[in-house]
Image (spheres, rainbow, N blue to C red):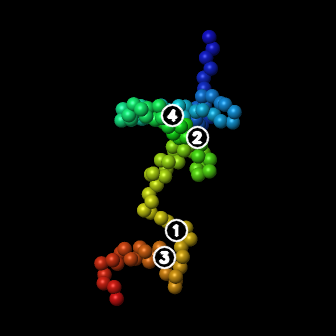
């Protein structure tokens, strides 16, 4: 009896389960759906019985949205990955790519100097 083995070309290559049209369904998508289903199932105990059907429909729509690719915002990533990147991004740190100079002093230097000399009295 012959067994066919799946040998990936790269260690980071995703395992494709099946293809429909232009889109493919990967093992990572199946795991995402499983986690989302478990989360929504655990939270369904807090939903009133009258709203269970709309709750499960909304959960299915949200789950499918999460595994769709984020083509415009983050190419190569899925929506759930783009959302995690957005939440993990430090919004308090902003780096200027092209420093603006005013009277020969860089704005970045002025901001860092202001923090250093905050204890000194202004003259």
Q: Which residue was labeled with disc 3?
A: 107
Q: Which residue was labeled with disc 2?
A: 68
- In the image, which disc is placed on residue 96? 1
Drawn side of residue 14 relative to residue 115, left or right: right
Coordinates of residue 59 in the picture (x, y in percent): 48, 36
Which label's residue is closer to the chain start, 1 or 4? 4
Q: Nearer the viewer, mark 1 or mark 4?
A: 4
Q: CA distance from mark 2 to mark 3?
A: 41 Å
Drawn side of residue 67 relative to residue 23, left or right: left
Q: CA distance from mark 4 to mark 2?
A: 17 Å
Q: CA distance from mark 1 to mark 3?
A: 9 Å
Local packing at callout 4 (Cα closer than 10 Å; few below 14, some 14-19, many 20+) is few
Coordinates of residue 84 in the picture (x, y in percent): 47, 47
User: What residue lies at 50% left-to-right and 48% top-to-bottom?
Assistant: 83
Q: Secondary structure at mark 1?
A: loop
Coordinates of residue 52 in the picture (x, y in percent): 43, 32
CB contact under 8 Å: marks 1 and 4 = no
Q: Secondary structure at mark 3?
A: helix
Which label's residue is closer to the chain start, 4 or 2? 4
CB contact under 8 Å: marks 1 and 3 = yes
Q: CA distance from mark 1 to mark 4?
A: 44 Å
User: What residue lies at 54% left-to-right and 44% top-to-bottom?
Assistant: 79
């Amino acid at each position: 009896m012959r067994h066919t083995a799946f040998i990936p070309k790269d260690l980071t290559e995703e395992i494709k389960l099946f293809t429909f049209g232009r889109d493919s369904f990967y093992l990572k998508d199946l795991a995402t759906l499983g986690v989302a289903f478990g989360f929504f199932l655990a939270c369904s105990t807090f939903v009133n019985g009258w709203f269970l059907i709309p709750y499960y429909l909304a959960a299915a729509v949200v789950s499918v949205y999460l595994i769709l690719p984020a083509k415009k915002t983050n190419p190569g990533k899925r929506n759930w990955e783009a959302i995690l990147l957005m939440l993990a991004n430090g919004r308090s740190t902003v780096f200027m790519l092209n420093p603006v100079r005013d009277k020969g002093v860089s704005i970045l230097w002025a901001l860092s100097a202001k923090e250093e000399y905050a204890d000194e009295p202004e003259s």
